[in-house]
Image (tube, helix red, strand yellow):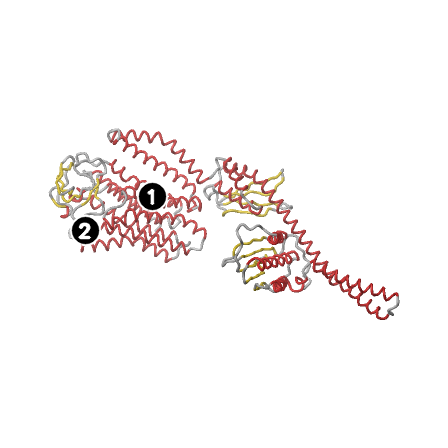
Amino acid sequence: MRRTPAVVAAALVMLGVLATTVRLDTPSDGSGVRLGWHPQGVTVEVPGPSGGSGLAAEDLVTGVGGRPLSEGPGTIEPPRAGQVVPYDVVRDGPRTVSVRIERSDPYPLLLQGWGNLVFVVALAALAVALRLRRPEEPATAPLLVLASGLLGSTITVAAGLPALTLATGGPYLWLFHLNTIVAYSISWGGLLAFVIVFTARRPLARRTRRAARLAYCGPAAAMALWSAVATLLAPHPLGWLGLVHTGQTAVVALSLIIGMTWGYLTFRGNPDPAMRARMRWMLGGGVVSGLLAISGWHLPELVTGAQALPWGAMGLAGLPFVAGIGIALRRHRLFDIERLANRSLVYSVVVACLVAGYAAMVTLLVSGVRLSQTAAAGLAAAGAALALAPLRGLAQSTVNRMMYGDRHDPAAALARLGARLQAVPLPAEVLPAIVETVARSLRVPYAAIDLADGAGTLRQAAQHGVPIGQVHAEPLLHHGELIGRLRVSARGHDDPLEPVDVRLIGSLAQQVGTAVQAVRLHEDLVRSRAEVVASREAERRRLRRDLHDGLGPTLAAIGLKSGLARRAVPAQSPARRLLDEVCAEASASIDDVRRLVEALRPPALDELGVVGAVRAKAQALAVELDVEVTGTEPMPALPAAVEAAAYGIAVEAVTNAVRHSGGTRCEVRITLVGGDVEVLVTDDGHGPRPGRTTGVGLHSMRERAAEVAGTWSMASAPGGGTAVRALLPARPEGHDDHPDPRR
């Protein structure tokens, strides 16, 4: 079964080659019939100079050799080359013109349809390469059928159907329609099957395979049914051919619409981000190509009987589809064939430029300089041969830069890295920016940085993408000390890093080492600060406990005992005066201890927990604002620094909402999210004012979060108002392990 697509593709191409060979070997009147026909005749195009043929573009041919075309093929004997045949045409009224029958000249045909030919050849080359490279990929089989069907039918249509063939009949007439009706229908069935298989999840389900088989047969079955209906509707054989080709145009347009709709729906329903990224460009390019083909050719032909744009430019409508495949290959590693894509793109660009230049030069020399076709073709071929080497070099360098980045230009890679680091606003974003820049500069799927700790153990600090194939590790040194390593993946399983890539990675590593050392120092500073803050808050908790549970009761006992002693001493006694002083000093000391305890740490934190403490404070602040406090209760034991930071941020945010928001409601939520404590305060006020300077309250909240290695942000709430969010690590570096005094 795996060989079936290849057999079908070979048959479709051979059918087109056979038809084209017969066409070029048969004498012709130099005309080409449009596929949308007039009921009583055919409108012809004359690709090259009419010369002495007698026919002109836009002529409506109604009869050949004295016999009406409506009588069907085979009404006259095939004329020989050099013979003159009378044609009945409508050109500013009915007339009879003499047409000389000559051997077919392929040059005007190539000039007319070069855009279509370049597109189908490039698509066929890509499909064959994909099938040979990735035969296990299900989407390559229908793509091969699509490309081969389009190639065979397009070269047949480019060869053209002379009006003479409609009168003489013969093998070419039926070969032409086998290609333009049967093979063309099969190719569009391949398009539908390709869309179904490409957008399906892997491995393919049984119903997906069944839908693909039905898609293969859909357009061909529709054309078979329409051909039978056209037999009943057509008044004569020429009318039947016209109806069949009109139906073919409708089937092609319908296939494009179904393919675009299916691709859009499956894209919206696919949950895989990587697959959606690949589908986005390929299906986007396909949708643009489909809309261009429908609006520029198929729809106008169905409505008016004539195409809005030249037939030879139809292949240009497929360029967005090819561009989508190219972007998917380069950015999202579609089918994992970067090296093959590189070569295909280079040769496709070279061939397209040479063909376009060759056609333009031949046209210029024939029409402008008045040279013969043979002389013009020889000069154009010589020019193409001279331009081949420099054109290939230019194309190779351009494609290499597109696919491999700056590996041949280290200065550009270093400049890109320096510019990216200058644009990074926060130290935490330095390492992600480095790996992203390295991956984009080298066009590799994966880059990562590992940092070394004091024991020499490496831990991953930042990464970009997913590794494919072998991963190269480059050490990062600072004054000879190993501080980390830069890891870069190959571009594919069959596309390892070249020596020039490794040299560029080494050059980048020298510059990256300094930035990584700065990040390490910043992390050490943040860690040390968190340790200091944690130790400070832990000591404050211990001091408060000692003062509250030790010194405070002792002073209270002293005051009570001195008061009892004071009652037993006469009022006029000197001891009575001393006892009065002791009682007063004890009372004042108790007040000082109480103020000191409250200054060290809010008592409500130890008595009610962080959620209860914020709730109690919010009730005291809520005068004109309804404040609701919710959260995780009971909250697990937290370090003192984290509790104090969460409490301070929440209280300050509520205070700002009461004073400045102008709202009627404020919500506070303190919860555990993973290993972090999230503090979220929202209100329904007017929201942050643009251009407002940062006040003391906002600065203090940001500082409290930074002290425990957390993050803080303020933004507009989804429904209006302000949202303040802090994310604090429940166990920051250097946290204290002392138990919560409430437990």
Instruction: Estimate how packed mark 1 is, as few (under 14), some (14 to 19) or many (20 or more) residues with alpha carbons within 10 Å.
Output: many
Q: CA distance from mark 2 to mark 1?
A: 32 Å
Q: Which residue corresponds to mark 2?
A: 240
Q: Give the residue type at disc 2.
A: Trp
Q: What SS does tag 2 mark?
A: helix
414 or 159, which is in the foreground?
414
Query: What residue sits right under mark 1 in the picture?
Result: 124
Q: Position of residue 61 (x, y in %)?
A: 16, 43
| The one of 625 and 326 positioned closer to us in this rendering | 625
Task: Identify the mark nearer the N-term, 2 or 1.
Answer: 1
Q: Where residue 464 sits in the image (x, y, percent)?
A: 51, 46
- Binning the other alpha carbons within 10 Å of mark 2 as few (below 14), some (14 to 19) or many (20 upward) gives many
Identified at 80% across, 66% down, the residue is 559
Residue 95 falls in image quadrant: top left
The image shows a total of numbered marks equal to 2
Determine the secondary structure under disc 1.
helix
Given the current orientation, which residue lies at the most extreme front position?
572
Q: Is residue 743 visible?
A: no
* Amino acid bearing label 1: Ala
Residue at horizontal 71 percent and vertical 56 percent from the top:
539
| Image height of 526 relative to 622, above or below | above
Disc assigned to residue 38: none
